[in-house]
Image (tube, rainbow, N blue to C red):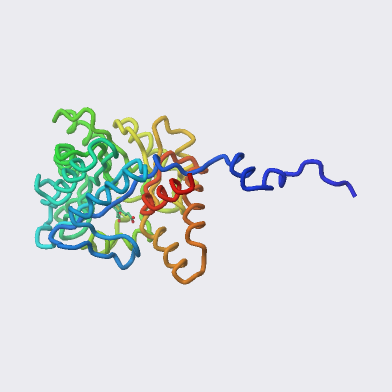
């Protein structure tokens, strides 16, 4: 018997050894907490499809932001949910300076100042009565260029309300460039753009629909990327960079780790990944049934993103996980 001399198991012998040789570990500063704020509610509202996540009031949102700062979280990404009656075909609440997202931005900036990177969703789906990410043409199709005009206006209103980073998530062609030019023209040269570069038409967005009281019937397949395609993510990356993206993102996370890796390998700007509602719900639901170890599963998914090349991770577990890192010292 020739016993092996090379024994990879030596590096797995003790927790201290494993910790020392670990190539990747999630860090609180790289986590970004997506948060929902809903207009017209007196108390936070639970989201049944995302156990543990709530639609915030302005007050509870402030608390969540302060908690994130205390835990060392890097950023927060805000989504606004307007009163149903205010939604219309062009998404007026999205450009109203007193729209819920703008009020939330002001509240959070007042609460945390610059201690947290404050980001906001530049998209129409939360504010339109048809639930699409853009405005519709006469035949009911999402009109790319008419939508760009709305995004430009939204981005400026959000920057005015205090967003450090604008996150256009609608997958309209040219959205980053139009937003960049609008921000610059309005004197917001320092407001950064986080491009949703590779955003796929995914079934895993399901639980998010309840989180934002979505009005959508149908799907987003004419604007979000088709799941079989990875090559076109690189084309989207080239376009976003040329249009001035400061950071880029891949979304969803786990089903698209290959896309994340390909983008991380070539991107000259920081790369984020969005662990979306369905990814969150899967782990929570299985854990609730006792089918997997919740804490280990969460850590493993967050580690996987780092291993696949993400510098930043948007996750609904951001604060909880950052707190866990603190407690572990
Ligand atoms: C669009 C948007 C969506 C998500 C973030 N921004 C929904 C969609 O594209 O259908 C999904 C986030 C999640 O599922 O956690 N504004």
User: Up-down: is 106 above or below 316?
Assistant: above
- Is residue 140 at least partly visible in the picture? no
- Where ligand 1 lies, by quadrant? bottom left
Q: Is residue 234 left or right of residue 211?
A: right
Q: Nearer the viewer, residue 16 or 33?
A: 16
Residue in the picture at 28% in, 37% down: 115
User: Up-down: is 22 above or below 243?
Assistant: below
Residue in the picture at 32% in, 40% down: 195
Q: Is residue 303 left or right of residue 54?
A: right
- Is residue 302 at least partly visible in the picture? yes
Residue 89 image position (x, y, % from top left)? 12, 56
Q: Nearer the viewer, residue 237 or 56?
A: 56
Residue 279 image position (x, y, % from top left)? 41, 58
Q: Nearer the viewer, residue 257 or 67?
A: 67
Residue in the picture at 17% in, 55% down: 127
- Quadrant assignment, res 221: bottom left
Residue 137 image position (x, y, % from top left)? 16, 52
Callout count: 0
Work out which residue is located at the far right of the displayed protein and give it: 1
């Amino acid at each position: 018997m020739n016993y092996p001399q090379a024994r990879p198991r030596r590096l797995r012998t003790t927790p201290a050894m494993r910790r020392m040789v670990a190539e990747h570990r999630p860090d609180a500063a790289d986590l970004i907490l997506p948060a929902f704020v809903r207009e017209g509610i007196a108390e936070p509202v639970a989201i049944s499809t995302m156990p543990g996540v709530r639609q915030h009031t302005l007050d509870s949102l402030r608390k969540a932001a302060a908690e994130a700062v205390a835990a060392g979280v890097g950023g927060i990404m805000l989504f606004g949910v307007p009163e149903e009656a205010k939604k219309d075909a062009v998404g007026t609440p999205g450009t109203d300076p007193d729209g819920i997202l703008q009020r939330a931005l002001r509240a959070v900036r007042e609460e945390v100042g610059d201690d947290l990177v404050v980001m906001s969703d530049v998209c129409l789906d939360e504010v339109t009565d048809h639930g699409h990410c853009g405005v519709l043409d006469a035949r009911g199709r999402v009109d790319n260029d008419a939508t760009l005009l709305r995004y430009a206006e939204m981005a400026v209103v959000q920057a005015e309300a205090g967003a450090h980073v604008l996150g256009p998530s609608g997958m309209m062609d040219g959205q980053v460039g139009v937003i960049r030019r609008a921000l610059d023209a309005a004197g917001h040269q320092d407001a950064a753009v986080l491009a949703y570069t590779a955003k796929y038409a995914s079934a895993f967005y399901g639980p998010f629909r309840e989180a934002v009281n979505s009005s959508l019937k149908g799907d987003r397949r004419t604007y979000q990327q088709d799941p079989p395609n990875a090559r076109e993510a690189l084309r989207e990356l080239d376009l976003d960079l040329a249009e001035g993206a400061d950071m880029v993102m891949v979304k969803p996370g786990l089903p698209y780790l290959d896309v994340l890796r390909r983008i991380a390998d070539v991107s000259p700007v920081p790369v984020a990944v969005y662990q979306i509602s369905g990814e969150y719900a899967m782990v929570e639901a299985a854990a609730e049934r006792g089918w997997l170890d919740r804490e280990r599963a969460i850590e493993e998914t967050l580690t996987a993103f780092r291993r696949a090349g993400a510098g930043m991770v948007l996750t609904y577990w951001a604060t909880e996980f950052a707190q866990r890192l603190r407690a572990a010292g």
